[in-house]
Structures are given as structure tokens and as C-alpha cells.
Amino acid sequence: MDSKKIKLRVVFMGTSDLSETILGTLVENEYNVVGVFTKPDMKVGRKQEIEESLVKKMAKEKNIPVFQPLKFNSDAVEELKKLKPDLIIVAAYGKIIPKSALEIPGFGCINVHVSLLPKYRGPSPIQNALLSGEKETGVTIMFMDEGVDTGDIIVQEKTIIEPEDTTATLMQKMSVVGSQLLLKTIPLLIEGKIEKTPQDNTQATLCQLIERSDGKIFWTDSAENIYNRYRALTPWPGIFTFWKNGSEVIRLKLNSIGLQKINPIEKHQTGEVFELGSDIGVQTENGIIILKELQLEGKKVTDAKSFINGYPNFIGSILQ
């Protein structure tokens, strides 16, 4: 059975870059997407300009009706009913979907979640996997219920996390994995060939919600943990520290860093900036962070050597 030929009525719900990739895959493979739900437009950047999600832009380009309820209340449920969906597909939507909505489609509501559930339930699984120093993660496609990522698992596929992966690079890889896994899953679902597996709630972990303040670096942490924080918070919100330049304390963003797990022979204070061969290092509780690209608040990004040329007193300072 070709689920595309029977014109299965699909409603898609998503907001992130991952969501755009998955929606694009559905459209490219000629699925009959009759409506898209995405979060309301947001103000972004210093100018606080209104910006549409990539999902909304794609849906408009493909002439797919777009819905952006502030809350998924009874009005949103009524809008959903009018679309008469056979299947709802959710990927990083960012809103809780009520039971009354989940019960509408005949084939149910499935979620593409970028972790190996029951690990990392919640809104930021990729960031949390990187924060924890995981060596692998994956994609789970699951039936949705009223809980947060607690539904029965349909299928999972593992993905290796490379040492250099950031949230941006890992998200890109997971978008591809998730899209292809979804294409394999939908026909099996329509043909009734799915075997679902309940999650083991005793193994469940919840995601830490990522906030801008999480980018603050504490040099009393290990270099490995700081590097994992950098990977997890790239591209947003990024990591930062504070530098006391004379009487002025300045916020300093660390746009690109490296890692050396072994301490140098010469001892340095925690947070001290020093020259390490041709590199610029910062001493942590255990190991060294190599500074590659820096950005003073309100200034342009610069490489570490150029920064030192402009601020020679940076060497020997103690970052806070």
C-alpha cells in the first residue's frame, strides 16, 4: 500500500529547524499535508524584529494553511477538527497538545523526538545529551499521549556523537536521520504493521530547559565539562565569562574554544589566562580551555591572537 497514493490527510506540528527539515521531507515525498501548526512569530535580535519560523515560511511557500495558536485550547482543537486529519506528525513543536486533539486522527498522533527515549524527555534533548558528554544519541518515533514524551515507542535509530559535534551539527544529522526514519515508519503504520513498546519509566530522564544564563562559564569546573557546555550551547545562547579590564568588568563571549585535558607543568590559578605555546589557554579546575575566537560585548568577533594584540593585559588576568 502506498500511503501517498491514498492521499492520507496529514497535519504537521513543529517550529524548529529540525521541524522544517521533516516538513520538507514530507512535502518532497508528496504527502498530503493539509495543515501546519507552529508557534506564534517571535521577536528576535537586538532590534526585536518579528520573525516567522522556517516551518511557517515553508508552509506558506507550499500553500499549506498555517495555524499559530498561543495556547492549544478548544478553539485550536476545533480548527484541527476542520482539517479532518488521518495522521498528526509532531517534531519539536514546543507546545503541549491536549488529549482532545490527540484523539482526532484515525491513525493517531506520532512524534519525532531526538533522543533515545526514555532518556532526555522534554524540549532540549540534543543540548542535554551534549552537556552530559554522551557518546551516542538517536531518534525515537513514538505515539503521543498526554504526558511529555511518555508514549509508546514505535522505532528508534542510534546516532554517534562525534567529539566536535555541537548542537548545530548534531541537529543537522538528526534531522536527516529523523526524516528518513519517518518515511520508513508511516507506510508500516498505515498497513497496521507497527509493534509498539511501552517506555521503561524507571530509566527516564528529563531535559534541563536551556536559558541564556546557562552560558555562564565557571572556571572551577573541569575543562571537559566546560567544553561540553560550549558544544551544547552552540549556536544558542553561546558561552561567556567576565573579564576585569582595569576597573571595568566586561562580558566576554567565547565563540570558539578547544580542549586540553592535561594540565601544563607550570601551575596557574583557576581562571588564569596564559600563553600555551602558540595558543592562549585558560586554567580550569582540571585541564585547559584553548581560546580560539572571542567577542567583547558590542564588538566584532576576533581570533585570540588578534585579541591579545589589542589587549596585551589579557594575559595573566583572571576570568570570572
Image: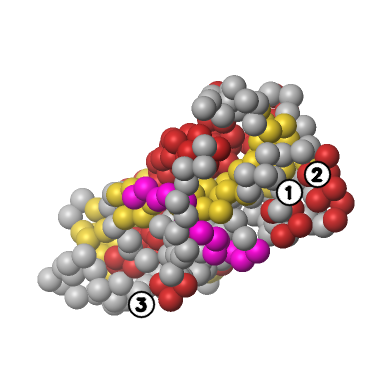
In the depicted view, which residue is nearer to us: 145 or 139?
Answer: 145
Residue drawn at point x = 33 percent, y = 61 percent? 134
Residue assigned mark 3: 220
Viewer-nearest of labels 3 and 2? 2
Q: Amino acid at mark 3?
A: Thr
Magenta residue check for 149? yes
Q: Residue at x 72, y 60 (%)?
A: 99
- Residue 57's disc number: none
What residue do we see at 47% from left, 55% from top? Answer: 196
Above or below 286: residue 109 = above
Q: Which of the marked residues, 3 or 2, is nearer the chain's N terminus? A: 2
Give the labeled residue for mark 1: 104
Q: Is mark 2 in CB contact (under 8 Å) with mark 1?
A: yes
Magenta-tinted stretch = 146-158
Amino acid residing under circle 2: Lys
Residue 197 lies in the magenta stretch? no
SS of the residue at dot 1?
loop
Q: Secondary structure at mark 2?
A: helix
Query: Is residue 236 rendered to the left or right of residue 57?
Result: left
Quadrant location of the C terminus? bottom left
- Residue type of the residue flagged with mark 1: Ile
Q: Nearer the viewer, residue 26 or 169?
A: 26
In the displayed structure image, the side of residue 175 where residue 83 appears, left or right: right
Residue 210 visible in rendering? no
Q: Can you say whether 259 is above or below 79 in the image?
A: below
Residue, disc 2: 81
User: Residue 11: which quarter of the image?
Assistant: top right
How crowded is the residue under tag 2: few (<14 C-alpha within 10 Å), some, or many (20+)?
some
Q: Position of residue 270 (x, y in %)?
A: 32, 76
